Image (cartoon, rainbow, N blue to C red):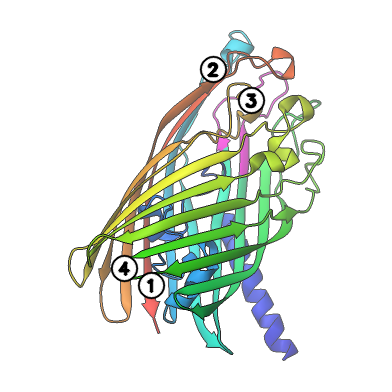
Amino acid sequence: MAFRFMCIRSVASLALFLAAMGGGVHATEGVNLIGMGPIQKSLGGAGVASVKNSSWVLLNPASLTELDRQFSSSMHLLMPTRSLDSSPAFGSLTDKSTDDSVYLIPTFSAKLGEWLGVHWGVGFFGSSGMGTDYDNARIPYFGGDSSAQYGVGKLVLAGAVDLGDGWSVGAGPVVVLSRIRTDMFNGVAPSADDWDYAWGIGYSVGVLKRWDRLSIGLSYLSEQRQEVWDKYTDLMHKPLSLPEQVQVGISYAVTESLEVMLDYRFVHWSGVPQWGDEPNAGGFGWDDQHCVKLGVEWEANEDLTLRAGVSYGKSPIDSSAVFANGLFPAIMETHVALGFTYRWSEKLDLHATYVHAFYNSLTDDGSQMGGMGKGTSFSMYQNGVSAGMTYHF
């Protein structure tokens, strides 16, 4: 038994580490992806009331009651294009910097089965991240201050119970492994520019109610409290915990083959001091996000399902915090997505999705940090493709 536990723990730690390794530097809704896996992404992150596969274990654990035993995996190739212009703040000493690095982000999830009336599921997700690797420094005087890499992997273990009459509830712990590496200027010199890791933990709760054509869903993800960084306490004095969030949504089957989903997501960035504190107080100055998501699914035939989605959430960064977030330009607001699932066989489904985040830019108004960043601007747009599979067993 002890050996089996050690094996399970080792596999979970390795998977979580790989998720954190791959989860870096995307910054779509804040530091979060709009969805886990190609199906969620193709719906713009909507669907808390309409489960599609085991990747829903994080979005709404109650949805496990509606799944057969299955394993899902995917890879997302993110291609963001970012630029930073800090010349206005430092005269002509800096040039406009760009970064078009690409990143691979993995997901793994499974509906394990039902034991003692509880439906069990697990997921390993590269869920969050942001950063840059500019060709010129943001602050030219001290060297460094041109790159930041931050990635988050989440391990989710959840159980769900069918209460009857269309009601299901689910819950479980969420274990987080984060990593960061940056040469950001800390007020005295460039930072360590070496990888640092931190663990965190939270929990998720979900509710699902289904009628004939209509369903409603609600999920709550608690704050995932994280350790303080060991190597970057001079840069961030407080833990970089992940904020709580709430998602509520409805799903309606217009016909037997056409379904529409509408969701609202709230992300409480201001509730975590390191994210929400103003730059003058050593934080990033992020505001809360209110995201609206619309997804449509059409079963074209018994083998092919087509999907489209759109998501909008105002950037958590405003013009007062542009310079403070120069290496973390998490300003994406509008995403559109198209995707499909092809049933290869009775046991195997194949998924693919394309996501585009529209261009956005901001300019610092000089109201924080003594006005040192006034005129600094950054911009970004993104393209991404996902491919994955679901195996039913």
Nearer to us of marks 3 and 2 is 3
Which of the 4 image quadrants contains residue 53? bottom left
Along the line of sight, the residue nearer the viewer: 381 or 261: 261
Q: Which amino acid does label 4 sit on?
A: Leu
Mark earlier in primary sequence (1, 2): 2
- Residue extent of the magenta highlight: 132-149
**Which secondary structure type mostly characterizes the magenta part of the structure?**
loop
Give the SS element for disc 2: loop
Instruction: Tell whether 216 sits left or right of 95.
Output: left
Helix, strand or loop at mark 3: loop
Q: Which of marks 1 and 2 is in front?
A: 1
Amino acid at pointer 1: Thr
Residue linked to disc 4: 350
Q: Mark 1 points at which residue?
A: 390
- Which residue type does callout 2 highlight? Asp
Q: Residue 61 occupies which quadrant of the picture?
A: bottom right
Residue under the point 60% across and 24% down: 322
Q: How far apart are marks 3 and 2 (CA)?
A: 20 Å
Nearest to N terminus: mark 3 or mark 2: 2
Left or right: 14, with 36 as reference point:
right
Label 4: which secondary element = strand
Name which residue type carries label 3: Ala
**Residue 70 in view:** yes
Residue situated furthest left in the rendering: 301
* Residue 95's disc number: 2
Residue sitting at x 81%, y 48%: 230
- Identify residue for label 3: 321
**Quarter of the figure with the N terminus:** bottom right
Query: Where in the figure is residue 4, as x and y percent of width and height?
Result: 68, 87
Foreground residue among 151 and 221: 221
